[in-house]
Amino acid sequence: MPDLPRPDLDHVLEHGGDAWTALQGGHVLITGAAGFVGSWLLESLLHARRARGLDVGVTALVRDTAAFRVRHPALAAAPGVRALGADVRTAPLDDVPFTHVVHCASAASPRENADDPGAVVDLIERGTTHVLEAAESREGVRFLQMSSGSVYGPQPPALDRIPESWTGAADAREPGQRFGAAKLAAERRGNAAVARGVGFVAARAFAVVGPRLPMGGTFAVGNFLADTLAGRPVEVRGDGTPVRTWMHAADLAAWCWTILARGTPGRAYNVGSNEAMTVGDAAGRVAALADPPVSVTRRAQPDPSAAPDRFVPDVTRARTELGLEVRIGFDDALRRTWEWLRS
């Protein structure tokens, strides 16, 4: 897997706020470090360590160290990085001297959730509990849970944007909501740990775009990019009317490091773009990246009488409490991702 673009890493460095000062002299445990979000956070931390001369240790918890070295050789070989291969539910953490945790290992794709939802729920809930228990056994650990906007369950049509105060919640009895329900249960376990001295905060991530985004799977923009890169028509698998937002991964990483450093313990923060558009509009913008542009097809036609499905975050809390802003617009995010893919 190629390195992330230097401008993207510099963006995280510049907008990571005072996170780098907070990490000085510490040790960060990143679980799920081989995944999309985990590798972004690991590589941006290493970039900050080099650029700022930080004294910070790093342990990267991955499922398979050999696969990690193949997929991310530069990260695995970076000085001061210890790759620990283990299941997050049983990983030996007693000898890891962490002061900060970035917990990404509970992430799972919708496909994994559909194929074996019980295993995904177990990974999320037991994995989070195991790492939290290790954090509770020491003093003053800051803990970032990579959660998901799916904790809210379906967004009501009349609700323009979902704030963290929204009382809706994913229903574990619904197969399509089990992932979100498990994430919410993990958050509640983390909030309980605050009383035991853990600085637990949750980042509820919405849709993301950027280098390393999986293509040819269940991520709409990833599929659109794969189609465009292959020179074939971009296929919208529905009617194109759902309303979504996509945040560039460099903004996401900068937000996550800031939330880890300065987020209020026991609090969740929406992490996502505030630039809403339909999936069909996004498909058209991706198709226009090619020269000449490729066409766009839809599997279904819109029903004019149906209210569009929405999944749009309200990011007021992150903006007002932590000074965070979406700095990379969608078109710029696409351009950056496209240039990385073509290079």
Image: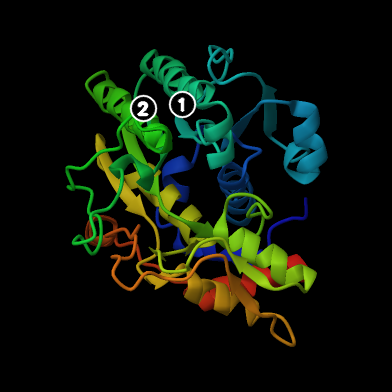
Label disc, if present, on residue 186 of the rendered structure: 2
| Residue at 64 percent of width and 67 percent of height | 337
Residue 105 seen in the current view: yes
Taking the view exactly as shown, the residue that stands out farthest to the bottom is 292
Instruction: Label 2, secondary structure: give it.
Output: helix
| Left or right of 146 on screen, residue 220 | right
* Count of marks, rendered view: 2
| Residue at 53 percent of width and 21 percent of height | 119
Q: Which residue is mark 1?
A: 124
Instruction: Give the quadrant of residue 317.
Output: bottom left
Per the model, the C-alpha gap separating discs 2 and 1 is: 7 Å
Compared with 66, 110 (above or below) is below
| Residue at 25 percent of width and 38 percent of height | 169
Compared with 185, 300 (above or below) is below
Which percent across, then down, holds residue 145?
41, 35
Instruction: Give the quadrant of residue 286.
Output: bottom right
Which quadrant is the C terminus positioned in?
Answer: bottom right
Judge by depth and name the residue closer to the eye, 49 or 332: 332
For the residue marked with disc 2, what is the amino acid?
A: Ala
For the residue marked with disc 1, what is the amino acid?
A: Ile
Mark 2 and 1 residues: CB-CB less than 8 Å, in contact? Answer: yes
| Left or right of 50 on screen, residue 230 | right
Which percent across, then down, holds residue 23?
47, 41
Compared with 164, 247 (above or below) is below
- Pick whichever of labels 2 and 1 is earlier in the sequence: 1
Residue count near mark 2 (Cα–Cα under 10 Å), binned few <14, some 14–19, many ≥20 = many
Residue 249 seen in the current view: no
